[in-house]
Amino acid sequence: MNNIKIETINYNLYYGKFHALRDINIKIPEKKVTALIGPSGCGKSSFLRTFNRMNDLIPGASMTGDVLIDDQDLFKIDPVSLRQNVGMVFQKPNPFPKTIFDNIAYGPRVNGLKDHKKLEEIVENSLRSAALWDEVKDDLNKSGLALSGGQQQRLCIARALAVQPSVILMDEPAASLDPIATLKIEDLIHELSQNYTIVIVTHNMQQAGRVSDYTAFFYTDETRTGRLVEFDETKTIFTNPSDQRTEDYITGRFG
Ligand SMILES: Nc1ncnc2c1ncn2[C@@H]1O[C@H](COP(=O)(O)OP(=O)(O)OP(=O)(O)O)[C@@H](O)[C@H]1O
Ligand SMILES: [Mg+2]
């Protein structure tokens, strides 16, 4: 078995009185891609937001159980430093209304880095890692908003990489992109998993099959409370799932 990067033990999440996630136990392996799949409303985004403590920002949200990152209690880590270590990329690309350079340099500058040479280095390395450098190297002073949707998403990935995280969370990162841009993001995710732990939410079963090493299937019944039905290697989930609900979902019988 691989090293475990993130672990949850009997994790429950509530929005006010609503029980959104029940008793989730999972061990997310380091430097692998883990896909979270399941029907709409089963709590995938809520679960993902746990790992950078973004649920803390939602009034009325509360949690029980344990969440560990690198064997440390995640809720004891200062949220600002946690969010540097655990970067996030959203469904809709959200570059800042700044130049490409300043988008990437933003995080390092917030951390106090002023040396322009060092910032240049970080910008180039981050853009290279996000497979965007060749397309933008002559346009670093152009607005990030002037890029195509797929380029904007890679810019957001580069921005997340610039502060040297070890985990990247992605919530349907290709949902707003065309098929070519989607394949580029998928290649990139695969590439990045050599150095980063990636947790990705996707509704696209082919995509989960293509990009992930492990898959977690979430499901919710009439109570609307989300549960983790099954977690295993992606090839097992897709070829030989142990729960009928998983099979029904991946074969498109519901959801
Ligand atoms: N901020 C919030 N306040 C109250 N309830 C919320 C909040 N965010 C999500 N929920 C509820 O928690 C449940 C899980 O929502 P979540 O967005 O995590 O699902 P999801 O699996 O990501 O769905 P989708 O596939 O549609 O994105 C839903 O019933 C939703 O209505
Ligand atoms: Mg969601």
Image: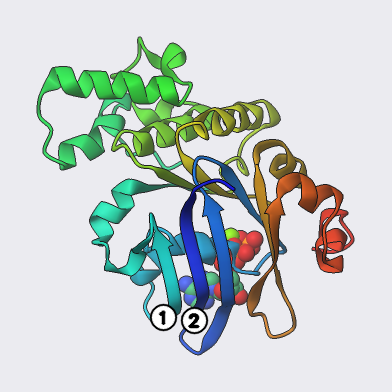
Label 2: state its secondary structure. Answer: strand
Which residue is the site of mark 1?
62
131 and 212: which is toward the camera: 212
Q: Residue at x 74, y 79 (%)?
A: 221
Residue at 32% x, 18% y: name it: 124
Amino acid of disc 1: Ser
Horizontally, is 121 left or right of 132 in the view? left
Gap in Å between the C-alphas at discs 2 and 1? 5 Å
User: Camera-side residue: 75 or 93?
Assistant: 75
Q: Quadrant of residue 120?
A: top left
Q: Is residue 150 visible?
A: yes
The answer to whether marks 2 and 1 mark residues whose Cβ atoms lie closer than 8 Å is yes
Element carrying mark 1: strand
Q: Amino acid at mark 2?
A: Tyr
Q: Give the residue at mark 2.
A: 14
Position of the C terminus, as image quadrant, is bottom right
View extreme (bottom): residue: 17
**Vertical placement of residue 103 versus 15, above or below:** above
- Name the residue rendered at 10%, 29% in the picture: 114
Sequence order check, earlier mark of 2 and 1: 2
